[in-house]
Image (cartoon, rainbow, N blue to C red):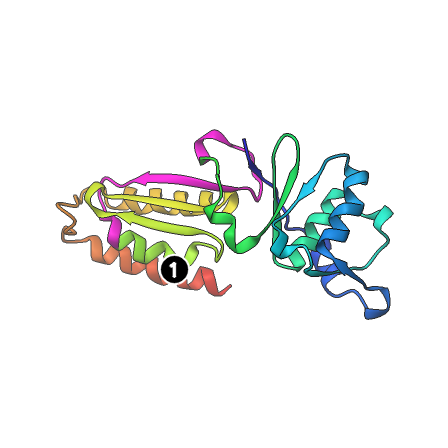
Amino acid sequence: MIKFIPIISLKFFVLLFSTATNAMPLSLNDLATQLEAEFGKPIAMAAEYSETEITIAEPINKIDFADFLEILQQHRFTVLKEDNYTLITPIKYARTMNIPLLENHRSNTNLFMTDVIQLKHLCSLEVFETIRPLVQKAGHIAVYNAANTLVITDNFESLTEIKNIVATMESEAEDIACADGSPAPGSDKILERWSKKIKTMTRS
């Protein structure tokens, strides 16, 4: 089973702002080839990415797996890890990979997950418009109006926050029922209030 590897940490910012005198450029393929021996597992990538120039700020023999992930993050890549090898892929393609369901993974990590949210009181299309700003750029949200359902892919932390917000919105609307995709009277006030609150959250 493919697992999405967490890559965000404070050390990323150290690498990002390292001085030019310490920087050493090399191709992504060269970096992977040299680190395979260190990690004891093959590192694969599509040929089109192999010559991508990567800049590192420390000697190869001092780079551990966490450092490797941070370097990739700096250059807009991440990794998927299988049993026998590690695959490098652009972050922008993360949401199209085989991502596990949230219910099957409970750790508080930056792993990407998918969750299906079945709404009982509010209508999915309106909730979709309200919570969409909370979904990360590499994530994805889809609405299935006929089933009054949302399907969201995002990192674990963001997805958990969104799920909790939707649950709270639903609890505030327990006396409301969405009928055939048409919101009942009263839902507009709840959604408007949460829309304003989410705008404040995304600005901070």
In the image, what residue occupies the spot 66% across and 36% down? 85
83 up-or-down from 187: above or below: above
Q: How many marks?
A: 1
In the image, what residue occupies the spot 37% across and 56% down? 132
Residue 188: percent from left, percent from top: 21, 57
- Crowd band around label 1 with a 10 angstrom C-alpha radius: few (<14), some (14–19), many (20+): few
Question: Which residue is the site of mark 1?
Answer: 197
In the image, what residue occupies the spot 14% across and 53% down? 185
| Nearer to the camera, 159 or 20 | 20
Residue positioned most to the front: 47
Question: Does any portion of residue 46 appear in the rendered image?
Answer: yes
Q: Amino acid at mark 1?
A: Lys
Residue 29: percent from left, percent from top: 72, 52
Q: Is residue 113 magenta?
A: yes
Residue 46 left/right relative to 154 = right
Secondary element at tag 1:
helix
| Nearer to the camera, 61 or 49 | 49
Q: Quadrant of the N terminus?
A: top right
Question: Does any portion of residue 158 appear in the rendered image?
Answer: no
Residue 27 left/right relative to 121 = right
| Nearer to the camera, 61 or 146 | 61
Among the 4 quarters of the image, the one containing residue 108: top right
Q: Point out the stretch of residues depicted in magenta.
A: 102-125
Residue 155: percent from left, percent from top: 51, 46
Residue 102: percent from left, percent from top: 45, 36
Q: Is residue 120 magenta?
A: yes
Residue 25 left/right relative to 127 = right
